[in-house]
Image: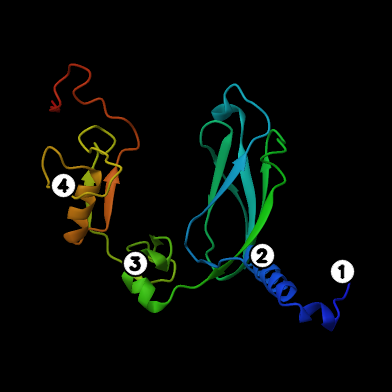
Amino acid sequence: MALLNKSYFMNPKRLLLFSVLVLFHFFSTAQTPVHVWEMQELTLTAANSYKNPYLEVKVWVELSGPGFNKRVYGFWDGGNIFKVRVVADKPGAWSWKSGSNTNDPGISGKSGTFNAIEWTDQQKEENPLRRGFIRASASKHALIHADSTPYFAIGDTWYGMSASRYKWYDDDKERPIGPDAGFKDYVRLRKSQGFNWINVIAAFPNWKTDDKPWQLRME
């Protein structure tokens, strides 16, 4: 880049243009820090077509960070889109590089970086999940967060969550508990009562769709 002499900046229009270009470069290259335990969704677009991408394609990223170097697998998200979700478990510089079993140039060989920062104590109080994933304690008799803060589970069982009984509304309108209540309304109710988890079946129950009574009898 050629050096600009002092006379170049004597022109107000040139000075303004130069300032705008500098600011544009700064904001376009600066990275917004993310927090530890904050999910980052990486989107990859396949260059090739597949008859059954769900079965044919495996996609992943090699994720590296402070004391961490593991392969994280992703999933097909419809069309030619694949996604990988990652989190940083420690503050610092993180990087990733994608790969696939098909060596598709659209989803393989991509890379990126991000910088993770810690949550403040106040932010952790506002949302305890910011303390990290829940795991068993050393004694295996209790649950703790990643930062060793105790986790006391108060839960509910929603085995039919994926059925029509728990209606889904895209809006955030609050509806009274009853026939018109949706999934979000039940979450709000349990949250207001101090619950912090729900137990579900990751499948589609066939209640009231197979001409069998929904009451089960064990004899």
Q: Earlier in the sequence, mark 2 or mark 1?
A: 1
How busy is the neighbourhood of tag 4: few (under 14 within 10 Å), some, or many (20 plus)? few
Left or right, residue 16 beside residue 10:
left
Which residue is drawn at the image coordinates 23% and 51% (left, top)?
Answer: 187
Q: CA distance from mark 3 to mark 2?
A: 31 Å
Q: Amino acid at mark 1?
A: Met
Report the residue marked by disc 3.
Answer: 127
Report the residue marked by disc 4.
Answer: 175
Q: CA distance from mark 3 to mark 4?
A: 24 Å
Q: Is residue 37 above or below residue 46?
A: below
SS category of the residue bearing label 3: loop
Residue 29's disc is 2
Number of the front mark, 4 or 1:
1
Which residue is drawn at the image coordinates 57% and 37% (left, top)?
Answer: 81
Residue 119 appears in the rendering:
yes
Where is residue 1 drawn, in percent x and y?
Answer: 87, 69
Q: Amino acid at mark 3?
A: Asn
